[in-house]
Amino acid sequence: QVAVLAQVVGVLIHVADPPRAHLVAQKMAQSQELIQKLLQAEKEAENVIANAKKGRLAKLKQAKDKAEGDLKAFRDEQERKFQSEMGSKAAADPSAELAGATAKEAEQVMQDYHQNRDRTIAYVIGKVLDVPTQLSTTQKQALTTGVV
């Protein structure tokens, strides 16, 4: 369209003023050259923009991949910690631990029994043997009235 327009303008100028037609043709040629340079620059700018977009997308993808890798490593580490903690707890037998605690408490009871046995026996025997052999006045009065 630009070339057709330039030809039309050139023909009109050549018809209107033949001596200036050469100058106009030269200016038109320079204009055509400048227009071509402008179009070429636009194409190059579009290529630069397209390459920049591709580069940005590649960097985003690379950052996403790295973040996913870091996240996977973190999850794996946390899973390993969890499994090691749970593995030790799962390996421990709760009934064996309870049996051990029960045996320890039973041993403590037996130790307390042996430690206090002699004193308890002496206390009970003392109370049994410390019965007064005489009747109290209340007991004598009950016997004399025949209440008992």
Image (cartoon, grey):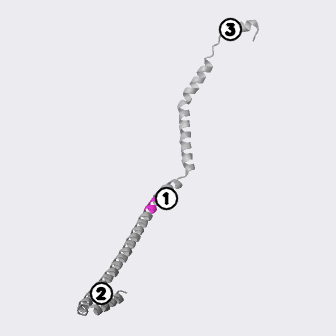
**Residue kind at label 2, given as amino acid type:** Gln
Q: Is residue 142 above or below residue 9?
A: above
Q: Main secondary structure of the magenta part?
A: helix
Q: Residue furthest front?
A: 16
Distance from Cα at disc 3 to Cα at disc 1:
80 Å
- Which residue position is annotated with label 1? 83
Q: Mark 3 near mark 1, Cβ–Cβ under 8 Å?
A: no
Secondary structure, mark 3, is: helix
Q: Position of residue 65 (x, y in %)?
A: 42, 69
In the image, what residue occupies the spot 25% across and 87% down? Answer: 27
Element under label 2?
Answer: helix
> Looking at the picture, does residue 63 appear above or below residue 21?
above
Nearest to the observer: residue 130 or residue 39: 39
Residue type at tag 3: Thr
What is the C-alpha distance between the residues marked 3 and 2? Answer: 147 Å
Q: Residue at x 36, y 89 (%)?
A: 4
Q: Position of residue 122 (x, y in %)?
A: 57, 24
N-term-proximal mark, 1 vs 2: 2
Q: Quadrant of residue 146?
A: top right
User: Which residue is depicted at the point 43% across and 66% down?
Assistant: 68
Q: Out of 126 and 83, give the one closest to the viewer.
A: 83
**Which residue position is annotated with label 3?**
138
Considering the numbered disc 1 on the image, is that residue within a helix, a strand or a loop? helix
Disc sitting over residue 32 in the figure: 2
Closer to the chain start, of discs 3 and 2, is: 2
